[in-house]
Image (cartoon, helix red, strand yellow):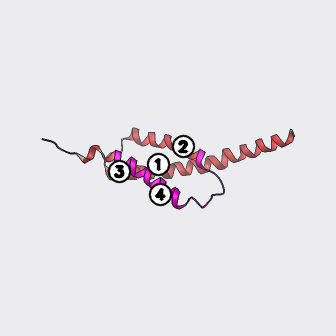
Amino acid sequence: MFHFNLGLYIDIFTGVGICFLVMAIAYKFGERKLKNDYSYSIYLYHEIFINIIVIAGSSGFAQTWIAVGVVYICTLICAYISCHVIEMPATRYLKNRAQMWR
């Protein structure tokens, strides 16, 4: 007899749901521009926190969504710090150095 276990597909539903959530937020707030571009910092740090959650072994629907929230919050905090402590000073330094050689 065929038995359908939803637990096997929770991660698929979560992944698709997160994709739709990100696209909806991007579409809704796409016209608003931030002063700084955090996309590269987010790209650098998100996988670190995803791997930590995977290694820690988040299981169950509620725990998965809590883990997603933790990943978002930690990624955004690290991206903000990285952007302001590393990227922006390095960009200013390189722009000033490039102007010296003109």
Q: Mark 4 = which residue?
A: 24
> If the image is split into quadrants, where does the N terminus sit?
top left
- From mark 1 to mark 2, how far is it between C-alphas? 9 Å
**Residue drawn 72% across and 44% down?**
91
- From mark 4 to mark 1, how far is it between C-alphas? 18 Å
- Residue interval drawn in magenta: 11-40
Disc 4 vs disc 1: which is toward the camera?
Answer: 4
- From mark 3 to mark 1, how far is it between C-alphas? 12 Å
- From mark 4 to mark 3, how far is it between C-alphas? 23 Å
Residue 31 among those drawn in magenta: yes
Q: Mark 3 = which residue?
A: 63
Is 90 on the left or on the right of 39, as rendered? right
Mark before the other along the chain sequence, 4 or 1:
4
Q: Secondary structure at mark 2?
A: helix
Mark before the other along the chain sequence, 4 or 3:
4
What kind of residue is marked 3? Gln
Q: Mark 2 = which residue?
A: 45
Q: Position of residue 82 (x, y in %)?
A: 62, 46
Is 23 on the left or on the right of 92, as rendered? left
